[in-house]
Amino acid sequence: MASSAANVPLIDDDTPGFGEEENPKQFRHPYVVLFHLGFRAAAILVYLFCGWFSDGFVTSFVFTVILLALDFWTVKNITGRILVGLRWWSYVDNEGKSHWVYEARKEGDVRKVHAAESRVFWMGLIVFPVAWVILFILALFRFSFRWLVLDCIALSLNGANVYGYLRCKLGKGTNLTGAVSSYANGFFRQQVMDKAVSMLTRQAQTSNVNSATNVI
């Protein structure tokens, strides 16, 4: 089946502009942030501790999959749009052709994104898939093939949202590997520059103190 991808502006909503809230550090959408992290955390907790309350693997499997599905739908359709102004989705036209759409707010509307909520969104989007990768590796070393199936489901659902939102963020036709590498290199260079400036500043301050101390 053929497919196509497109980037279109996200439909404007009634989210207040950035800076209009009384406290910029306070979440503007606390319940949305809670659900963004809640389903993801609950899925991992059930995966890890459901065996304490039930001896059956099926119970753990069913509850974990339900939470993963709720998380996938919530992140894909609600939290991404509200917290960072991004959304991805797909549809099939009358000819049976699949279209993938990656939406983002217009350039002038980026100011509506709350900085603290944006950090929480991206942190939750990346950290939990990493946790599932660790759980997958542990299950692999224990030869727990039943749990490997559940880990694969979790990685598939979490990975789909990561890929979709990276496409929304980086744009249509972008080489994700190259873009991520470029971002990482830029971040690394910035950190090196900050460390160098900090070291030079401390050395200059130390020299000034020593000079002042030697003055009689």
Image (spheres, grey):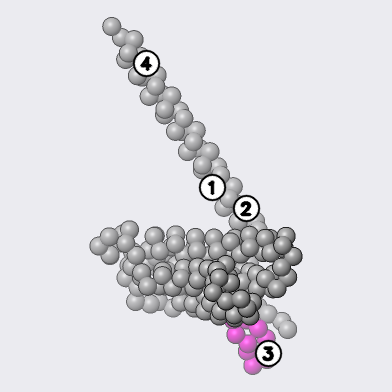
Q: First in sequence: mark 4 or mark 1? A: 1
Q: Check contact, mark 1 vs mark 3: CB within 8 A.
A: no
Viewer-nearest of labels 4 and 3? 4
Distance between the Cα atoms at labels 1 and 3?
43 Å
Give percent across and percent down for residue 63: 56, 79
User: Is 81 on the left-hand or right-hand side of 162?
Assistant: left
Do labels 4 and 3 touch, CB within 8 Å?
Answer: no
Q: Which is closer to the viewer, label 4 or label 2?
A: 4
| Nearest to N terminus: mark 1 or mark 3 | 3
Residue that carries the numbered disc 2 in the rendered image: 181
Residue at left 57%, top 76%? Answer: 54
Judging by the rendered image, the residue that carries numbered circle 4 is 210
The reply to whether the magenta stretch includes residue 55 is no
Q: Which residues are magenta?
A: 87-100
Closer-to-camera residue (51/10): 51
Q: In the image, what residue occupies the spot 72% across and 62% down?
A: 142
Answer with mark 4 or mark 3, whichever residue precedes in sequence. 3
For badge 1, the amino acid type reads Phe
The nearer-to-camera label among 4 and 1 is: 4
Task: Give the mark, 2 or 3, whose residue is nearer the N terminus.
Answer: 3
Q: CA distance from mark 4 to mark 2?
A: 43 Å
**Which quarter of the image is occupied by the N terminus?**
bottom right
Residue 200 numbered mark, or none = none
